[in-house]
Amino acid sequence: MFFLFIILEVFSILFVVKYNGYQKSVAFGQFDELSGSFHRTYNNFWEYFSLRKINHDLAEENARYRKMLPSAFLITDSLVHYKNDTLYRQHYQYMSAQVISNSTNTAANYIQLDKGRLQGLNKDMAVISPKGIVGTVVNVSNNFAWVMSILNKESRISVRIKKNAQIGTLAWEGGSYLYASLKDIPTHVSVIKGDTVFTSGYSHVFPKGEMVGTISEVSIKPGEHFYTIQLRLAVDFNSLGHVYVVKNLLREEQMKLQESNKNE
Amino acid sequence: MSNTYIRISIRFVLLILVQVLILSNVHFLGYLNPYVYLLFILTLPFETPKWVLLTTAFALGLSVDLFSNSLGIHAAASVFAAYFRPGVISLITSRKEYEPGVEPSIADLGFQWFITYTFIITFLHHFCLFLIEAFRFTGFFGTLGHSFVNALFTVLIIILAQYLFYRKKK
């Protein structure tokens, strides 16, 4: 009996390593489609109950965009008319998608979306919600996509503190899904509780200036040259519904340049 | 006899559905999650052969895994818990004979026996589960504490389920 026990455990561990590798996050292949449609049905059902809140969020977002419309401003300079012309080349493209499965309570959280390769999604696209950043697409099948949530111990995202323009790294060390930590901010700059943190745009994945969260706790551990900063995330991961997938239209060019730079 | 098989199979499917559809979405206080599908392993009849115990536990864990994008983690923890079940039973029981077909339950064996039994198995399962999930030994005591607290939560739900769904057979 001990042998059977060992064999089953070895099988399980092999599965764990093969399919849950933090970095690899291999999708489930065939099973992906089945589990996807299963979760979609389940989700469609529950979504009715949160329609009121989603409507509210959308209205809020609409209001924010209306503020940015040219018609909301007094035109004092003719430059604004060139908006879609040579001066402003489109850099990011937004596609809307729906979350069909999501977790916040494991060490490596992933989100599944109801759009995939056929709808134009690809690896390394950013995922944001109306309130802030959500994660990065790590795997796509024909009709579904897996997103590594920022609530994942392997997730690293380059961010910037709004007030002093310092660049740091967003990471998550487990525990509550409401908080993440901000690393690599040197102790000689001043950091204040309540400061806003945005994406830096350095990663070629997230657009610059997407909301991440606000600083909720700052401390320095003895002997360290960097702050220990806790961040209150802007997004409530437990109630994710609609998200946008962001495609960086110039990513290929940026990566190519970076590669050729490395080779020299 | 075939009646027992059917009942156990229905319980298998039912517990998986309840687990993946409802309980896996419960995040009490942010990170406590009841894994009540363990009730299936706990309530298999006493005379179940060991190999059946292990393979059903494997199938159970794997089914839960498939729906939670964690292939292997629950399977490993379930097999681990099932392997220790006979040992735990003989450890906390003085008399050895049971009527054939008896399943471990509060109604048949008493509250104290059942809660001790459930807690030990649940803790073993959770500890294995969280250790594999973290996949490293740093933060070992954090994992231990998390297992302990989460086990208390799971046991609470299992005890409630026992009082709700199991009746003493007369």
Image (cartoon, helix red, strand yellow):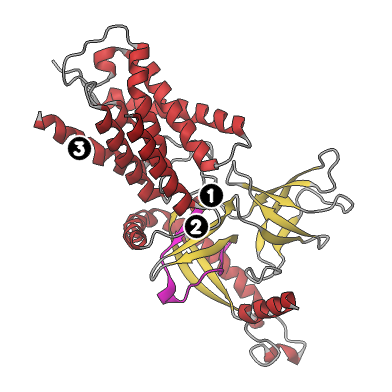
Answer yes or no: is residue B37 visible. Answer: no
Kind of residue at disc 1: Ala
Measuring from the top left, give residue A112's x and y in whole percent: 44, 59
Residue that protrudes farthest toward the front in the picture: A3
Write down the chain letter for disc 2: A
Q: Name the mark on residue A25.
A: 2
Closer to the camera in the image, B33 or A251: A251
Q: Which mark is residue A108?
A: 1
Q: Do the residues labelled 2 and 1 touch (CB within 8 Å)?
A: yes
Q: Name the residue type under label 3.
A: Ser
Q: Residues within 10 Å of mark 2 (few under 14, many from 20)?
A: some
**Residue identifier under label 3:** B9
Q: Which mark is residue B97?
A: none
Asked if the stretch drawn in magenta spans residue A131, the answer is: yes
Q: Is residue A195 above or below residue A261?
A: above
Name the subunit of mark 1.
Answer: A
Report the side of B47 relative to A76 (left or right): left
Residues under labels 2 and 1: Cα distance?
A: 10 Å
Q: How many labels does the image show?
A: 3
The extreme right residue here reads A188
- A72 lies above or below B153: below
Position of residue A36 relative to residue B38, above or below, is below
On screen, A196 above or below A91?
above
Q: Is residue B60 visible?
A: yes
Quadrant assignment for the N terminus of chain A: top left
Residue stretch in magenta: A110-132
Chain letter of disc 3 in the image: B
| Mark 2: secondary structure | loop
Give the left or right position of residue B78, taking residue B163 as reference: right
